[in-house]
Each structure stands twice: as C-alpha cells, then as structure tokens.
Image (cartoon, rainbow, N blue to C red):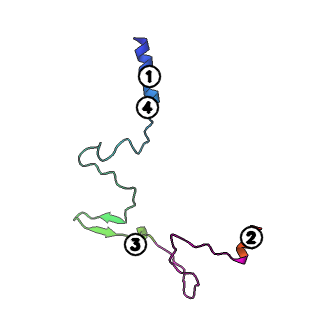
Amino acid sequence: MPLGLILGLGRAMRRKQTSSLDILSSKRGPRDYYKGKNCKSTGFHTRKGGYVVMNEKLPNYVVPDLTNFKLKPYVSQCPREVKTTEAADTAK
C-alpha cells in the first residue's frame, strides 16, 4: 500500500506543469465561455444595444514625413549582398 502511494506521487511530479493560461480553454469551459485573444476594447456597449467608440482608446500611429526619402518602403525577403566602402571600414 505505501509503495503504491509513493509511486502515485512520483507520477504526479513527473506530469507536465500547466500554465495559468492553459487551465481553462473555450473547449473545456461552459458552453457560453469566451476566452478572447487578450485584445483591448475600443469603446463600450450602451443599454439599448449600441456601441460607442472612444477616440482615447483607439491606437494612434505617428508616421514621419517620408517625402524626398531615398529608401523605398518595400523590403525584399531575399536581400542582395551589397558591398560598400562604409561596411568594409567598420568590419576592420
């Protein structure tokens, strides 16, 4: 009897530890459980079923002015090797 108890404790210790996010998923929870994707809301629901978007909660992207900029916005996935004198000087 004590040997079986010790073996059971050993098996429990070897079992993979679950993180707090894996404990309850939408498949393991109740039928109406929705876990979400960790997104922030952009407003709130009204009592009559509407939705009010708040400008303070919307993301604000600051983009610099790129007129007369010599680089292009596209970056290739297969860049070519370009040897310049500046790169050769910094490598030495």
Q: Residue at x 51, y 73 (%)?
A: 76
Range shown magenta: 60-85
Which dot marks residue 55? 3
Q: Earlier in the sequence, mark 3 or mark 1?
A: 1
The image quarter in which residue 67 lies:
bottom right
Q: Position of residue 47 (x, y in %)?
A: 24, 63
**Label 2 secondary element:** helix
Relative vertical location of residue 68 with respect to residue 35 in this rendering, above or below: below
Q: Position of residue 36 (x, y in %)?
A: 34, 54
Q: Residue at x 69, y 77 (%)?
A: 84
- Per the model, the C-alpha gap separating discs 3 and 2 is 47 Å
Within 10 Å of disc 1 (Cα), the crowding (few <14, some 14-19, many 20+) is: few
Which dot marks residue 9? 1
Q: Earlier in the sequence, mark 2 or mark 1?
A: 1
User: Magenta span has 70?
Assistant: yes
Is most of the magenta stretch helix, strand or loop?
Answer: loop
Q: Amino acid at mark 2?
A: Thr
Which dot marks residue 15? 4
Q: Amino acid at mark 3?
A: Asn
Front position among marks 4 and 2: 2
**Label 3 secondary element:** helix
* Farthest-out residue, top: 1
Q: Amino acid at mark 1?
A: Leu
Q: Earlier in the sequence, mark 3 or mark 4?
A: 4
User: Magenta span has 68?
Assistant: yes
Front one among 76 and 55: 76
Q: Residue at x 29, y 45 (%)?
A: 27
Query: Considering the image in quadrants, where does the N terminus appear?
Result: top left
- Per the model, the C-alpha gap separating discs 1 and 4 is 10 Å
Q: Position of residue 78 (x, y in %)?
A: 52, 70
Relative vertical location of residue 6 with respect to residue 51 in this rendering, above or below: above
